[in-house]
Image (cartoon, rainbow, N blue to C red):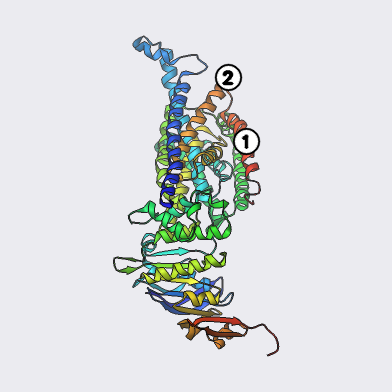
Amino acid sequence: MLTAEDIRVSLGKVEVLHGVSAQAQAGEVTVIVGPNGSGKTTLLRALTGDVPYQGRVILNGQDCAGLSAWELAAVRGVLPQAAVLAFPFTVAEVVRLGLTSARHSGRGDLVARALAAVDLAGLAARLYQELSGGQQARVQLARVLVQVWEPMVDGLPRWLLLDEPVASLDIAHQLGVVALMRDYARKGGGVVAVLHDLNLTAMAADRVWLMDQGRLTGQGPVAEVLTDAALERAYGCRFRVGCLPPAGGWFALPQAAGPV
Amino acid sequence: MVALDIPRLAGEREAQARLTLFVLAAALALAMLLSLSHGASGVSLWSLTLGDAMPARDRLILWEIRLPRMLTGVLVGASLAVAGAVMQGLFRNPLADPGLVGVGAGAGLGAVLAIVLGGLAPLWVAQTLGYHLVPLAAFLGGWASTLVLYRVATRAGRTSVATMLLAGIALGALAGAVTGLLVYIADDRQLRDLTFWGLGSLGGASWPKLMAAGPVMLLALLAAPFLARGLNGLALGEAAAHHIGLPVQRVKSVAILTVAAATGAAVAVAGGIGFIGIVVPHLLRLATGPDHRYLLVNAGLAGATLLLLADLIARSIIAPAELPIGIVTATLGAPVFLWILLRRRGVVDL
């Protein structure tokens, strides 16, 4: 379990997260949604320790603040929003960086499997800088995947913390990443991701955290949290949510502004 | 197909890097022999085969002049190239070079301070440190300027090249101003010592100087390979490096110390020798890729070889007089540097 206890974050003198408490379960995909500036990314960055915060982040029963980089890396992989890379490394070399602190067998094979998982199998020998933005994002995802490839180790779940993993991807690869997250959770791992697209969120998430103005305004299953009223309050525009037969797929349809 | 493809590919660049290592090691051995056997005096290595019949003058030249000079050249060349590679890895930028961004100037200032004001230090300091005073001061100067530079140029794990270069100019100017002031108050003997900093030379190499600065350089050279994994990870940025499990703060501190030690000690014995630190790592990255596990070792070998060859040119082109080696490395290195900038135009925004 990943627990956030009363997380407060200040940037300069302005408090941008006002005491967020939330839980994510292993074996589930948890998606953080909310409008721009609502604190989604800041919350994730507090969970990963990338911004100074007050409060506690408990991962598998241990306070993250007391764990070394090596111990944290063994149980969680973190995908940052903006991926940078200095020097002309090849795609395979970048992915292999994910194995820096790893202890598992079959390492060479893992790189190939991770690249296949993000649909980049043919590009292993290419230079990272030569790829498109969407391809680079998938290389970074593969790097995070090899780091925590097995979703469960010694009976403990491992975690993927992903900040907008589909931001620059085409729709097919967005669905691919959703499938990847679902698969990881199905095998016992935990996934926490920031997403923008509500419909994609509905496909991916077992549980959503709805953020609004630095506060968590709802957490739970998609259909319970993302109601017409809650979405309207958070995003300031009208929504029509519903389910499509026959499988009952949830959707949110934003309504154009204008006379009611 | 996929599974077959990757090990082959990964193996290719690695095999190339390993082959390069052997070629460079052989080249260095050759350069060391050349450096020992050539010189203004015309003494040849063959006289070693004479055994006891070897003239005393030849023995003196080989043991007291050429050998320390050659060893100094090896250590200084390797230190400059490795310091460049480590600094570029730390700053995540191929243009970072101790000589260009003020670390060399800071180390030079430390050395000059020690030369001019060393006489003012209490007697016990002079007695305890002896020949170590100048390298130590140069190390401290290099360390302080690297620290300032990293603080100024790096924000939230990202290094701004423009800020780095501008801060380097400021540091260099500051160090230059203080150095100028010291030159103004220096006496004639000190002045002669100081002139040497501006241009760089292996001409002043001697056993005592080598014994003082050599261990520092050797330590830095031995520490550098342990930074390889850390510097590879830092290419992803500081945050991501932390998330793959690297002790980022420790890697940074050790890298800064390594750069300062290598640059400081090299500057202390040989003065300001430019461009080795930027040209050598860059060419190696082009040839065998940026993996620091190979880059750092290969840079050391190539830097040592290049500096010995530059020294050979410096002391044979107008023999029996000799050119300061800094002139040779700048003449050869500056055009290569310009070529690097030309190639990178459009790729990097300064």
Q: Position of residue A21 (x, y in %)?
A: 44, 79
Q: Pick whichever, A253 or A232, lies toward us.
A: A253
Q: Residues within 10 Å of mark 1 (few under 14, many from 20)?
A: some
Query: Are dots 1 and 2 in contact, CB under 8 Å?
Result: no
- The lab-note entry on whether marks 1 and 2 share a chain reads yes
- Helix, strand or loop at label 2? It is loop
Q: Is residue B41 above or below residue B76?
A: above
- Which residue carries the number 2 mark? B321
Instruction: Tally the numbered discs.
Output: 2
Note whether residue B55 is visible.
yes
Chain of residue at mark 1: B
For residue B255, which numbered disc appears in the image?
Answer: none
Q: Is residue B50 above or below residue B292?
A: above
Chain of residue at mark 2: B
Q: Is residue A113 above or below residue B144?
A: below
Amino acid, disc 2: Ala
- Which residue carries the number 1 mark? B334
Q: Position of residue B325 (x, y in %)?
A: 56, 29
Q: Quadrant of the C terminus of chain A?
A: bottom right
Q: Residue furthest bottom?
A: A260
Who's the residue at 43% across and 41% down the image? B220
N-term-proximal mark, 1 vs 2: 2
Amino acid, disc 1: Ala
The Cα–Cα distance between marks 1 and 2, rounded to whole angstroms, is 24 Å
